[in-house]
Amino acid sequence: MKINQPDLPDGYVPEGTESTFLTWEAVERSLESSLHYWMATTYPDGRPHVVPRWGVWTDERFWYDGSPETRHVRNLEVNPACALHLESGAEAVISHGWSRPSRPVGDELGARLSAEFGRKYSAMGYAPTPDAWSDPAAAGLRCFSPRTIIAWTDFPRNLTRFEFENEEKVNR
């Protein structure tokens, strides 16, 4: 993974501002602990579409599920490029990458995903079992793989970009 600072237009950074970088560990903690994520996809005609998602950040990927009939999934079937954003604009984490259907999962990965979904969402009525995604006929689990993540907690001082080496780390 490469870590750098995006170029900003003149006037965004006050003269004499010292820049620092966020650590990947701090950004990953935000991705892991968030309850609500926003995903932006594109309609086939080019219009934007944004939807809130529940999911878990595990193995440097965002795992979420839902019906293949949803608008955002139908958009992703045409164009898998999307953006994933946490709720805060002050402590921002903005991810750009791809979302694709996952292959069936079970065993160790299924147990880890189930535990994380249960930890985060069981109080809201959602706690899938470890085998929830093991049946190939059970569609719905998707995997978002980041290409870049831009984050800050003190803009522009610690504006940080993380660039991932593997373009698509999709569980296929």
Image (cartoon, helix red, strand yellow):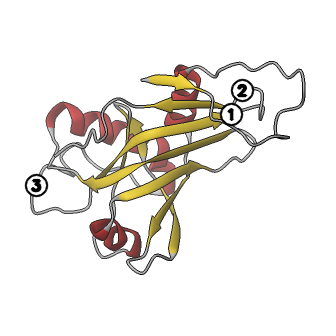
- x 41%, y 41%: residue: 146
Between 129 and 81, the residue placed more toward the observer is 81
According to the image, label 1 marks what residue? 152
Which part of the image, by quadrant, shows the N terminus? Answer: top left
Measured in 3D between alpha carbons, the distance from the residue under mark 3 to the one under mark 1, in whole angstroms, is: 39 Å
Q: Looking at the picture, how far across and down is residue 140, in whole percent?
A: 26, 61
Q: CB atoms at circles 1 and 2 under 8 Å apart?
A: yes
Q: Is residue 60 visible?
A: yes
According to the image, label 2 marks what residue? 158
The furthest residue to the front = 10
**Disc number for residue 135:** 3
Q: CB atoms at circles 3 and 2 under 8 Å apart?
A: no
The tag earlier along the polypeptide, 1 or 2, is 1
Q: Looking at the picture, how far across and down is residue 63, in whole percent?
A: 35, 46
User: Looking at the rendering, which quadrant does residue 106 occupy?
Assistant: top left
Measured in 3D between alpha carbons, the distance from the residue under mark 1 to the one under mark 2, in whole angstroms, is: 6 Å
SS of the residue at dot 3?
loop
